[in-house]
Amino acid sequence: MRNDYLFLLITVASLGAGLLQPQSSLGSVIAYACGASVGFVISLALLIRAIRLGEFGSDVLALIAIFVTALTGEWIASSVISVMLATGRALERWAEGRARTQLESLLKRAPNSAHLVQSDGSVIDAPIGKVALGSRIMVRSGEVVPLDGFVIGQGTFDESALTGEPIPQFRVAGEEVASGVVNAGGSVEINTSKTSETSTYSSLVRLVEQAQASTASGVRVANKWAVRFVPFALLLAAASWLLTGDYSNAVAVIVAATPCPLILAVPVAIISGMSKAAAKGAIIKGGAALEQLARAKTVLLDKTGTLTQGGPEVSSVAFAPGADQSKVFMLAASLEQSSPHVVAKSILAEAARRKLSLTLATNVKENHGVGLEGKVGEQHVRVGQISGSLPKWAPLENALIVGIEIDGLLQAVIGLDDPLRDEAKGTLLTLRKLGVDKILMVSGDRKSTADQVGAEVGVDQVFAECTPERKLEIVHAEMLATKGTVIAVGDGINDAPALAAATVGVAMGARGATAASEAADVVIIEDSIKHLATAVLISQGARNRALQAAGIGMSLAVAAMLLAATGIMNATVAAVTQEFIDMAAILWALVPVASKLKN
């Protein structure tokens, strides 16, 4: 319902207008009736939605209470109940809107235009939906490829978002690249082979929509209480009427039973948890996601960008015997300043770590996918692929090997890998302490690499070389086998269908693809997997606090119902009493929850 704030304003204004006029006057009745009508509409809409979803909502008692109090002329009670109902809906709407606002910056990454090359060589920006098949487009360095196509010339692409392979891939003329990958080299031109409707990116978005449509919604905390509490309240009201012969007692019971602690205290506790999680670097998109996150039992983790850093870093360097190590690396890094390649960035980062002073290179030439060469001072420097086998002094076994040649002689060999996140292993241990029984790694990367990372962090099972469809199959299988929440974590476009299908999808939003962030229920906005464990911990605390607040409120409500059943309080007094019960439940919901684990 998009008018929750308007409904809250109307109900509050109606109650205030009624109280300012002489009681039982026509004006007061009209004012109260206006607020009651809004409350009735809200509760009826919520009940219809719950029936469609196959749930039993906690709002059914509110619907009955508003109806019977209006029917018997207890207008103040009817109006008060409506205010409480509208307040609960507005609180939940505010929380959802806050989460969506915080995500806006993450959802602007999807390519929506292309640099279209005209027949005269000029370049214009055009919406991707208007780019015809076979068009010639330009993709600049660092940009996302907007449409599938064949490379004109050559280029280097970061395909980790699609395949999970962290090392950039070199593509020559005629090779096809998919939409969603990132141009990791210089500007490149592409002949489009698919339209925006048939592109790889669009196909994955459709897969996400299908997965979301097939995902069953979870049972909310308030609804669990309602399943037990509503029948009890109706039976007590009926018994009171039969035993006392006074229907007003039954009405008072229904009013006292109106589950305002469920309507207000539970959302307050959930919103408090969502706000705390956001402050810790995790955006939880809604109360249902938080409640499910608290019940985590199985976690499926992507490798690249989730357990690993998601890009190449220098992990080892071997120097030729007698080589001046600092000078050799300084010369290589000085040359790499002229390249936009991700490997160049890694070498420059290592030079900064070594605190080397660099100089400018001249006559720089880059042979994409092969290497970079130029003059640094009086020396000719080349950094790139090594011809032939590695020398004996460089027994490296890294994912990517780069050689440094000075004046035609190989002086050093650099080994690059996608390093494991420092916090990865500790995060998995924390998740197990929080009740997670099973942790799987589901990766699109090669089996040997995935097995090595899986063994290092301590997952229970590794699935490698997975397509988006395969990841989706694994998620569905685990959801059938798990009694509890299945969490899927990833950052790439290829992870989006799995995130949408899981009970809770978690996207590494700091570097992740838009499709993953949109499909996920939780977005980690800081580039660290440790925030996943923090989000689970906070969710558990918030859910427990919500249950406690509901328990306190409903216990007090039962006491009020018993007093109403015996005629000690009428409907209006019961409504006012319910307000004090609400205050007690809400105050308890706002009490900070002590963390079970140290951050």
Image: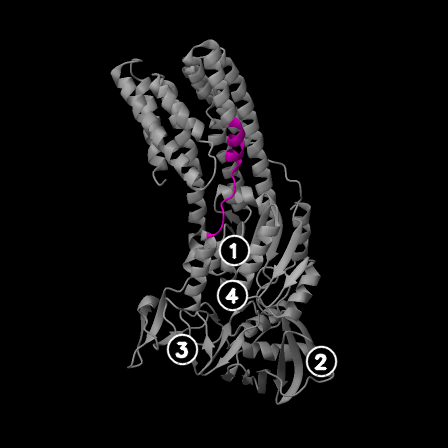
Q: Which residues are magenta?
A: 214-229
Kindly identify the amino acid type of the residue bearing the numbered disc 1. Leu
Kindly identify the amino acid type of the residue bearing the numbered disc 2. Ala
For image coordinates 48% across by 22% down, the residue present is 234
Comes first in the chain, label 1 or label 3? 3
Residue 227 placement, left or right of 127:
right
Q: Answer yes or no: do the residues labelled 4 and 2 have beta carbons within 8 Å?
A: no
- Foreground residue, 100 or 71? 71
Q: Which residue is mark 4?
A: 161
Q: Which residue is mark 1?
A: 499
Alpha carbons under labels 4 and 3: distance apart = 19 Å
Alpha carbons under labels 1 and 4: distance apart = 14 Å
Instruction: Nearest to the eye among marks 4 and 2: give it.
Output: 4
Q: Which x, y percent locates residue 594?
A: 63, 36
Residue 160 placement, left or right of 413:
left
Comes first in the chain, label 4 or label 3? 4
In this view, the residue farthest toward the bottom is: 408
Q: Which residue is mark 3?
A: 190
Q: Quadrant of residue 489?
A: bottom right
Alpha carbons under labels 4 and 2: distance apart = 32 Å
Residue 394 placement, left or right of 86:
right
Q: Which x, y percent locates residue 330?
A: 61, 77
Q: Answer yes or no: do the residues labelled 3 and 2 have beta carbons within 8 Å?
A: no
